[in-house]
Image (cartoon, helix red, strand yellow):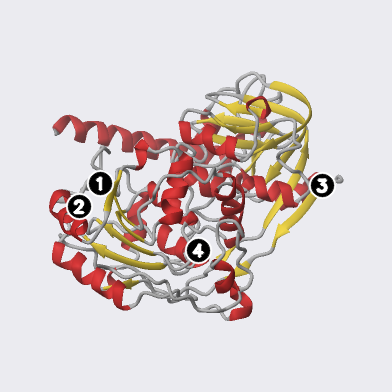
Amino acid sequence: MKLLKSRRLRSLKKKYLGLLVNHVVLKYNLPKLIPVSCDVLGPPKGVYYQMKDWIQKWGKDVEWVKVHPKTQYEPILPKTIENLSSWITMENCDFSWPETSVTVIPKGRVYEYRRRGYILTPDQHIIEDHSNQPLYHHPFIPNPEQRAYDSLYSIFLKPKLTPVRKIAGQVAVVHANSWENYSHWCFDILPKLQILKEAGYDWKNLEKIVVPDIQFAFQRESLDLLGIRPEQCLTLSRGQHIQADQLIVPSMVSPIGQTPEWAVDFLRENLLSNTKNLTNIYPEKIYISRSKCKYRLVLNEAEIFNYLEELGYQKIYLEDLSVEQQILTFYHAKWIVSPHGAGLTNLVYCQPGATIIEFFSPRFACPTYYLLSIPVHLNYYYLFGEGPQHDNPTDYILELDKPGSGYQDILLNPDKLKETLSLAVRGRHIVSHGLDSDTAGTRKAIPEYLPRAAEYSRGKPLELGFHLD
């Protein structure tokens, strides 16, 4: 324990010393004093905080295409037996999906450092809002301050960049934070392909696409489902530095954890519709187990699942399934009970009206999948495990910034789960989430997979025709 505390203290000292040095370096624009390229000596020359800042200063013709406008959406409160105010506050929150765009940067670069992909301009500046370092905003933090991750400017401590690999022609960049996580891969990276397509750069026709290092099966499987060939991919592994004649850069999809409706449609239309309709018999009621994971375990899972099994639930280990099998498992599921985890990314493939009950440890609650339930049109419920909770609602979101947060194991009260299931049974119907029939009609259905969703998209409520036994 003393060793861990000592390591933690050294880590904090290093972090804050680095932040102080970075602050001084940027405040006084010290890199610009170095008279040679950062390929020879020194870090990048500075930062443009937004792409439009560089375009304005560059003063030359730059191809920039607006793709999606900023869109407000109307949330509803999640359903729970808990004290709702213990988690969220809706006051002064900006519930919106941001504008997206594509910019073509002549002689643009992408540089990998500490698992991030930095976009560099011809004048060797980082473009912050396109460089895998989005400022961490969240709709549950009223009037959020702009907070960058602690490693944002650590690149300015480098004595020089690694040698650059120059590539002729056009190269698109599809990269984002935390790419090794299934949820961030699906929601923050893959939808960038749709941004490119709507700007006129169909991913199937692009000769080269920069993607994060391919280390996991889900990455290759999802790219295969999208029809992206291995020879198209330039993997941005550690220290890679790539320059293209024309670097095609899509903007970030959205703030972390806020998946836009257009991204939901993209995943459903391009991954769900490309799955082979396997002949497996998929259960309608599933419990997602984390017992094979290293953290966020359900301490009394045997007791919890014994109860659920009596109700007809089947236990699912997502790590044992391919991406295609996960997609189809969630597509056919009508009731899902699960601890919080990246596996719930697959909720995006559920049919409208499915019910999800998500549970958290008492001092950690991430609203990613509640927010996802809005564009997917799911009935969302949540509850906490046993233990003291935060007094301030925003502390749950601020907890996300803390190292190791969300890793705590969960002790779930069976009576609270029973009460939540009872609440869900009483309220089983498709909820429009405050959308009228005209707005709901923007939801796109996939005929071969969602024949009944088409009825909902016309504003007609559906009777699901099932009940909790």
Q: Position of residue 218 (x, y in %)?
A: 48, 36
- Quickly name the residue at label 2: 410
Could you tell me how far apart the alpha carbons at marks 4 and 2 are, in whole angstroms?
Answer: 27 Å
Give the mark, 1 or 3, whose residue is nearer the N terminus. 3
Q: Position of residue 368 (x, y in %)?
A: 42, 57
Quadrant position of the N terminus in the picture:
top left
Crowd band around label 4 with a 10 angstrom C-alpha radius: few (<14), some (14–19), many (20+): many
Residue 63, numbered label: 3
**Element assignment for label 4:** helix
Q: Nearer the viewer, residue 91 or 205?
A: 205
- Quickly name the residue at label 1: 296
Tag 1 near tag 2, CB within 8 Å: yes
Amino acid on which disc 2 is placed: Ile
Q: Nearer the viewer, mark 1 or mark 3?
A: 1
**Element assignment for label 3:** strand
Amino acid on which disc 1 is placed: Arg
Could you tell me how far apart the alpha carbons at marks 2 and 3 are, in whole angstroms?
Answer: 50 Å
Could you tell me how far apart the alpha carbons at marks 1 and 2 are, in whole angstroms?
Answer: 6 Å
Q: Nearer the viewer, residue 83 or 124?
A: 83
Could you tell me how far apart the alpha carbons at marks 1 and 3 are, in whole angstroms?
Answer: 46 Å
Q: Residue at x 80, y 44 (%)?
A: 58
Q: Position of residue 256 (x, y in %)?
A: 49, 53
